[in-house]
Amino acid sequence: MGLLSLFGRSFRHGVHPPGNKEQTAGVPIRRLAFPPRLIIHLDQFIGAPARPVVKKGQEVVRGEPIAEPGGFVSVPLYAPATGVVRDIKLMPTARGPRTPAIIIGVHEASSQEVLYAAPPNNLEAMTRQELIKAIQRAGLTGLGGAAFPTHVKYADPPDGGLPPVDTLVVNGAECEPWLTADHRVMLEQPEDVLAGVRIAMRASGAARALIGIEENKFDAARALMARIGEDEPIRVRTVPVKYPQGAEKMLIQALLGRKVAPGALPRSVGVVVSNAGTLAQMGRLLPRGEGLIERVVTIAGPGVERPGNYIVPIGAPARFILREAGLATDHAEIIFGGPMMGMDVASLDTPVTMGVSGVLVRQPEGKGAGRIWPCIKCARCVEVCPMFLNPSMLGQLAAKREYEKMAERYNLDACFECGCCSYVCPSNIPLVQHFRVAKAVNRERAA
C-alpha cells in the first residue's frame, strides 16, 4: 500500500469559492449516446493543427485515424464513432472564431466498441523515445483544460539547458467549482491512473511521482493509495482546498516547495505535470495501441435535470449533450469548463474538444446584475492574485489599450487567467477578459 500524506502546505493568496460539487461527486460515470454528427476540430490543442487524412464522403470506423500530426508539437485525431465524413469546413469554437473541422455523420446504432484494429504496444520492450512516440500516436493532450500535447512535456528540449526531470506531479486537485470528472476517474479507474503514472515516469525520466489531491476528495486518495506497491516511488498527498490549487505552478509549490519563475515551465525546476484524467487515458490506451476518441465530462449546474459525469465522444455538439442531460430552462448560460476559467459558448453547435472537462449550465443573472462600475482601488484583486500581480493597474491599462505596457512593466504574461481577481472585484470588472484581449493583441503584434 502506498503512503498517503496529509499535507498542510499550500500557496499564498487565492480564493475559496463555493465548491458546488455535491451535485455530481457521488454520481458514477455514465456513457453518453452518440450524437447524429460529430465535429472534430483540427486545432483543438496547443501547437500545429492536425492535417486531415480523410476526404468528404469517406467511410470511417470508430477508432480509425482521421488526421495526422501537423508537426512535433501536434497530435493525430481519431474517429470517435463509425460513420461517413460529411464535410471538412470551418465550424464554431468556444474561443470564438471558426476553425477547420472534420464533420462525421454517425451511423445509427453505431457500436460503442473500437472497431479499428490497431496493433497493441509492447510497453515493457519500448525505450523512452519509443514511449514518447507512442504517446503522441495515441493523440494524448492535457485533459485538464490546456490541451498541450503530452509527449512534448516528456521529451527533452532540443536546445537543452534545463535540469533533468526528477519528479512527475500528478494533478488530481480539480479545484474548479462544479467539476468532478477527475474525482470520479480517480475513484472508479485507479488502475488506469496508476498505469499511466508508471508509463509517464518512464517516458519523462522521473524517479518519483507525487499525486496531489485536494482534501475534499479523500475517497479518491484512498482508492489510489490502496493500489500502490510499498516499494514503488509513488506517493499520494492531499493538499488544502483552495482555488487555484490545481494550477501547475501552485501545485508544484504546495507539493515540493519549488517556485516556477514567471514565463518559465515546470521543467525549469525538474518537474513535469500531468492531469489525472490524461494519465488514466494513457494507462488505458497505450497498451492497446488505440487513440483518444472520448473523455469524461462533468455536466452540471442549476439548469441541468440529469447532472453527472459522462463519457462523451470528442466532437459531440453542446446542443446534443444538453438534450441528453436534460436542459431545464430555455434561457441559460452555457460554459465549457468551470465558472472561473471556462469559456461562454455562443453557439450550441460548438463541440466538446479534448480540453473540455465540464459543461456548466447556469441561469442568467437578473437585469442589471452584470453592470460594471469604476474601480474603487480596494486592492482585493491584489490580495488574492496567486502570481502577486496588480490586476487593478493591469485593468486600467487595458481600458486605455496600453497592452504593450501591461506586458513590459506589469508582467501580464505571468497571468494564467485563473479568474481570482474577477471573482472578488466589487465593481464587477471583467479583468480576466481584458487580460485575454491584451495577450491576443500582443501576440498578433509580435507575429
Image (spheres, helix red, strand yellow):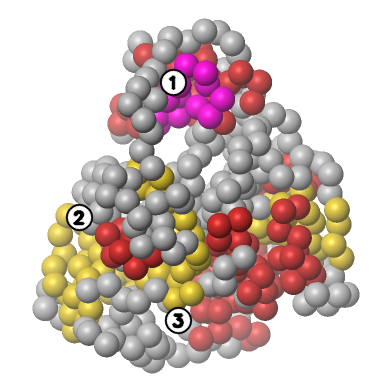
Amino acid type shown at disc 2: Met
Considering only order in the chain, which callout, 2 or 3, is on the residue closer to the N terminus?
Answer: 2
Q: Residues within 10 Å of mark 1 (few under 14, many from 20)?
A: many
Query: As rendered, which of 154 and 370 lies closer to the eye?
Result: 370
154 part of magenta stretch: no
The alpha-carbon separation of the residues under discs 2 and 1 comes to 31 Å
Magenta segment? 422-438
Q: Which mark is residue 91?
A: 2
Query: Looking at the picture, which amino acid does disc 1 mark?
Result: Ile
Q: Can residue 275 be seen?
A: no
Which mark sits nearer the N-terminus, 3 or 1? 3
Number of the label disc, if any, that sits on residue 429? 1
Residue 196 drawn at (x, y percent): 63, 72
The amino acid beneath tag 3 is Glu
Q: In which quarter of the image is residue 90?
A: bottom left
Q: Would residue 227 be visible to someone looking at this image?
A: yes
Q: Name the residue under label 3.
A: 290
Assign a secondary structure to mark 1. loop
